[in-house]
Amino acid sequence: MNLQELTIHELSKLLKDSEITSEEITKQYLDRIEKYDNEIGAYITIDREYALKQAKKADKMISKGNASYLTGVPIAVKDLLCTKGVKTTCGSKILENFVPEYDATVISLLKNQGAVIIGKTNLDEFAMGSSNENSPFHLTKNPWNKEHVPGGSSGGSAAAVAAGFCVGALGTDTGGSIRQPASHCSVVGLKPTYGRVSRFGLVSYASSLDQIGPITKDVKDAAIILNCISGKDLKDSTSIDVDVPDYMSVFDEFEKTGLKGMTAGVPKEYLSVEGIDPDVQRVFLESKKRLEDLGVKIVEISLPHTEYVVAAYYIIAPCEASSNLARFDGVRYGHRSKESDELIDMYKNTKHEGFGEEVKRRIIIGTYALSAGYYDEYYGRASKVRSLIMNDFTQVFNECDIIISPVAPTPAFKIGENRDDPLTMYLSDIFTLSANMASVPGLSVPAGFSSKGLPIGLQIMAQRFDEKSLLKSGFGFEKSILAEAADSSGPAGKFCEL
Amino acid sequence: MKISKKDVEDIAHLARLKVDESLVGKYAEQISDILKYIDKLKDVDISGAKLVSDACFNTNILRPDVPVKSGGPAVTLANAPDRRGDFFQVPNTIKPN
């Protein structure tokens, strides 16, 4: 069995047909991680006993006939989500030994269905970064080319899926942190609508932008996980009580109608973004043509405030971060500095020893922008610009069902290439930030490769709570790519070699 | 907007954050660059635009006021860096002479 190729829906069938047990497959994944993850660095924590205990429980569920798609399936989880009894570091020294007393709601939902949480994946500290280079524990390497970053901040989850270290994974996305690493690692990543999935137990970075979502090998698997984790949760007052459709129904719909009748908008402002890599440009144009061939009508649209998205985001997110991260003061949990005999010094030294450079930088920007005299000029203005960005999106969805764009301006860059230039790193988020700012869902689906063999994804966005359109168009697109790949001898392989 | 090394130190103090002396200059430079970029927001006509908090998140979400069992001190204090009995213990709030 090729562990890299195995999808959730395929494994689910094997488990239900008693071709394999969850315990056997979980052991195979654990062995593969043990053998190869020292080369990739996808995981921070693997707890073999914890995983196998869940697998045995899943096997009992299956034998009693209580299995769902996820029962017995090994799933990796970004280490920003609380797991009861298992270390949750948030990729930070400040929480290096933190063991939560409760599960995040998404973890409870996965466990209720019998999914096996196989391990906790690496990330940029507190999800602040686009490359996983901001983890204090170790680098994560791109399984397609180990000299390159896997993207971030859910780089560990994307690398784990691409390298066959799990069947599917959860990531979180505040400004592209699911979609960008998915694009860089040639896997599927879906950021749901803000409020679709409970954030309870997700350690907050920027609360009005954070959202949890699946990173998977194909679009169908993303739908399976989304079905499991969506819905209103009393423990998260920002989760929204909107009916959750059966996301698996879109695949039947696709078989009946294909993508005919759908309209995709291409924002004219995105085409003039500076610094787009020629390979990214090429793959985007090919993808547009592919959708057109599938019957999708392509129209040019305008998102006039695109130019201001990065600037508004890099005020709002650090402001919220500076407030959220104030809780890590060494009093109730996490690291406490031993170098202080007075409270204020203890706070300062604790954060100094616990936080990395990027986290400190964002706390300083956020604290500055929220300080007396600057609040209206920065946070107030950025928040108003954000509502204009939201209006842009509301308007364009009168003209189209989905919006298509590249995910990132370049394929995965080399490790260390952008490390000392935060502004350049921030500007690379241009295509993904809007979905978070406008609270709309976004999908990254593998679309091709650069001339150097690095993966490139296509981003699809839709109206709030219209994840179905993302899944349907993403599925049609994926099916077409795979059909072509099977017929060609180019860099068609969907799976990287370790 | 350009910020100085002293600004960085003052803001870090507000955030109860110690920053290495070697990093203060680098932060002042990098954050000045970032704020300079952010200044482009001044070009946007925001007259009539609402704060996002007013435009989208303006409804109070309440849940039924029903008491539920809590984990108690064992859970709350499980990760305490220092404790005395059922209390978090912290250093002196006033510097000893």
Image (cartoon, helix red, strand yellow):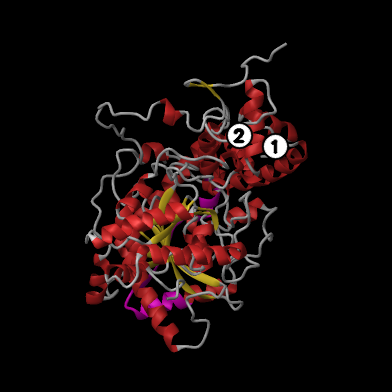
Name the spot of residue A372 as percent of width and height, x first: 57, 27
Q: Please, which residue is most extreme toward the top here?
A: B97
**Location of residue A485 with respect to A191 vertically, above or below:** below
> Which numbered disc covers residue B3?
1
Q: Is residue A301 left or right of residue A354?
A: left
Residue range highlighted in magenta: A286-312
Question: What residue is shown at x 63% (from left), y 32% (from top)?
Answer: A350
Nearer the observer, A53 or B67: A53
- What type is the residue that disc 2 sits on? Tyr
For mark 2, give the secondary structure: helix
Question: Residue A467 appears in which quarter of the rendering?
Answer: bottom left
Decide if residue A240 is in sight here.
yes
Q: For the N terminus of chain A, give its image quadrant.
A: bottom left
Question: What residue is shown at x 34% (from left), y 61% (from top)?
Answer: A72
Question: What residue is shown at x 58% (from left), y 28% (from top)?
Answer: A373
- What type is the residue that disc 1 sits on? Ile
Q: Is residue B92 left or right of residue A395?
A: right
Name the spot of residue A237 as percent of width and height, x first: 33, 38
Q: What residue is pinned by disc 2?
A: A368
**Location of residue A203 with respect to A332 vertically, above or below:** below
